[in-house]
Amino acid sequence: MKLNKILKNNFAGLNPYKPGKGKDKLTEEYDIAKPIKLASNENPYGTSSNVKKRIKAELKRLKEYPESTAAPLREELADFYNLSTDKLVIGNGSDELIGLLVEIFGADQGEIIYPDPSFIKYEVYVNLKKCQGRPVPLDNNYGIDLPAMLAEINDKTRLIFICDPNNPTGTLLSAAEIKDFLAEVPDDILVVLDQAYHEYVNDPNYFSAVPELDNWDNLFVLRTFSKAYGLAGLRVGYGIGHPAVIHYLTQIKDTFNSNRMAQVAACAALKDQLHIEKSSRRNQEEKEFLYTQLKERGLDYIPTQGNFIMIKIPFPSQKVVRFLEKEGIIVKPGAALGVKKTIRATIGSRADNKALLSALDKFLRKNNLAVSN
Ligand SMILES: Cc1ncc(COP(=O)(O)O)c(C=O)c1O
């Protein structure tokens, strides 16, 4: 095809995001009736029961375009956080907002600093939009290295991404570390704090960020309804920051970026904070269960503040992932996320976690690694 030359030329070297394998694909490949997906950090307990009712009621309005700035949802969020609506923008997932931020701040040779490994979409968008990226390796404990990120700042730096807790490692920065960092960053550089796993954090040293926004005009917070709120399939994320940044994001986003179902579902989900508390508490219980079980098996892991965990297994991660897939469990290979000889597994329900552990036991036995339980 003649267009191939242009396509290849314009997007040479693009390394797109590879989403976790879907359940249907696993069923098709290995004829497994009920695969367990622990690859995309979804909420194993689903979404609030309020959501279905609201979606059903909205069905009759499908022919109507949605509210272009998701005003009712922004109002709910403004109430929830006790701030004004001009500090909020809704995205088609926070993913969309990451892309738009890269586009705005990476224009005209602006440089973008991000941790590595971290959420892969920072890098994907930097490459896609042909911007200048400066990845900064994590420290020796798999945490984000803020001093090293500061050292990367130069006259062209426009944007810095921080992922807290960091995906894929689950590590957390302390409020003191982030505040010290913000105090050092020149105020003409936007610091984006991606807190996609905010609702799961239980470390008292966490920087909850939103109450601090008035102190830092150049701080921008990203959150999502895809994780604890259990709405990944509807695509709703949001950004909170200075009205000037919000204004430009709102100008350049797709006019109807957040759809009618997504908006009503997010409003309903936000109102059910009991569901969030339960999901977070159960995640904590299951995390402790996994910690104990992994220790019993002599398997090391990175302590996590998210709803996922990196487990160290002394084998190429693709080999482990392929084995687990044949056992009906989908996880992410650490090598694809930048941490070799690990797998990243979503912390599932007790049944999911037991299935993961029993599949891991089979792998360990097959490869002559002791299983002590
Ligand atoms: C750290 C982080 N940020 C952002 C996102 C994007 O979330 P969404 O686009 O579903 O809101 C994810 C999804 O996995 C994530 O892990």
Image (cartoon, helix red, strand yellow):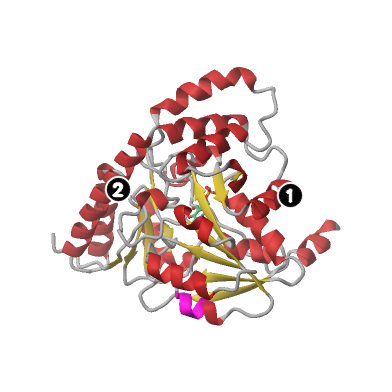
Q: Position of residue 283 (x, y in %)?
A: 30, 48
Tell me which residue sits at (59%, 63%) in the image: 218
Q: Which mark is residue 68?
A: none
Instruction: Say above or below: 202 vs 106.
Output: above
Tell me which residue sits at (36%, 55%) in the image: 308
Q: Nearer the viewer, residue 158 or 120?
A: 158
Would you call the spot at circle 2 few (<14 residues within 10 Å), some (14-19), or many (20 or more)? many
Which label lies toward us, 1 or 2?
A: 1
- Please state, as top left, top right, bottom left or bottom right, where the C terminus lies in the image: bottom left
Q: Position of residue 328 (x, y in %)?
A: 36, 47
- Please state, as top left, top right, bottom left or bottom right, where the N terminus lies in the image: bottom right
Provide the major secondary structure of the magenta segment: helix
Q: Earlier in the sequence, mark 1 or mark 2?
A: 1
Indicate left or right for 147 with 13 as reference. left
How many discs appear?
2
From mark 1 to mark 2, how far is it between C-alphas?
Answer: 37 Å
The residue under label 1 is: 252
Instruction: Say above or below: 163 vs 201.
Output: below
> Mark 1: which amino acid?
Ile
Secondary structure beneath dot 1 equals: helix
The stretch in magenta equals 145-149
